[in-house]
Image (cartoon, rainbow, N blue to C red):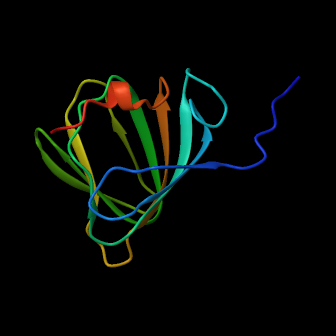
Amino acid sequence: MPTLISQPVRVEAAGTKPKLIEEYIGRVNSATHALSIAHMHSPAGWEEPGQAPEFDEFTVVLQGVLRVEHAGGTMDVAAGQAVIAHRGEWVRYSTPDNSGAEYIAVCLPAFSPDTVHRDS
């Protein structure tokens, strides 16, 4: 039988300003370890520590701009665009635009604080 996810659960976010994470599928809301799907709402000026996770992260930007720093430089991902951060590579996300950003993040396998490996 299919599993209905009636609503997301709010998950605490890392970073310099409060960011709203609504997890629909993942370790917290559905006990799914295979992947996670979350709707992110990041305010203007938000940034999180760098990370080198043990999962691939597929991100689709719905509104605003998501900045992705990586070992080779920086890219800005605008609404209507997507980015793939590959497992093991260092990345750091931020929202430099005055309107912040709204995006969907899919992690494979599911996001876990134990496997994200954030910078100190």
**Residue 24 placement (x, y as % from top left):** 64, 43
Total numbered labels? 0
The quadrant of the rendering that contains the C terminus is top left
- Using the rendered view, name the quadrant where residue 84 is placed: top left
Which residue appears at 47% of the width and 26% of the height?
Answer: 108
Which residue appears at 44% of the width and 38% of the height?
Answer: 58
**Residue 52 placement (x, y as % from top left):** 23, 30
Residue 42 relative to residue 90: left or right: right
Does residue 93 sit above or below 54 in this rendering?
Answer: below
Q: Hey, which residue is sitting farthest bottom in the picture?
A: 98
Residue 107 relative to residue 47: left or right: right
**Residue 76 placement (x, y as % from top left):** 27, 58
- Using the rendered view, name the quadrant where residue 46 is placed: bottom left
Residue 49 relative to residue 17: left or right: left
Closest to the observer, 62 or 5: 5
Closest to the observer, 6 or 83: 6
Which residue appears at 43% of the width and 29% of the height?
Answer: 112
- Using the rendered view, name the quadrant where residue 43 is placed: bottom left
Which residue appears at 61% of the width and 25% of the height?
Answer: 32
Closest to the observer, 16 or 75: 16
**Residue 51 placement (x, y as % from top left):** 23, 37
The quadrant of the rendering that contains the N terminus is top right
Q: Hey, which residue is sitting farthest left in the picture?
A: 72
Does residue 111 sit above or below 66 in this rendering?
Answer: above
Does residue 109 sit above or below 81 in this rendering?
Answer: above
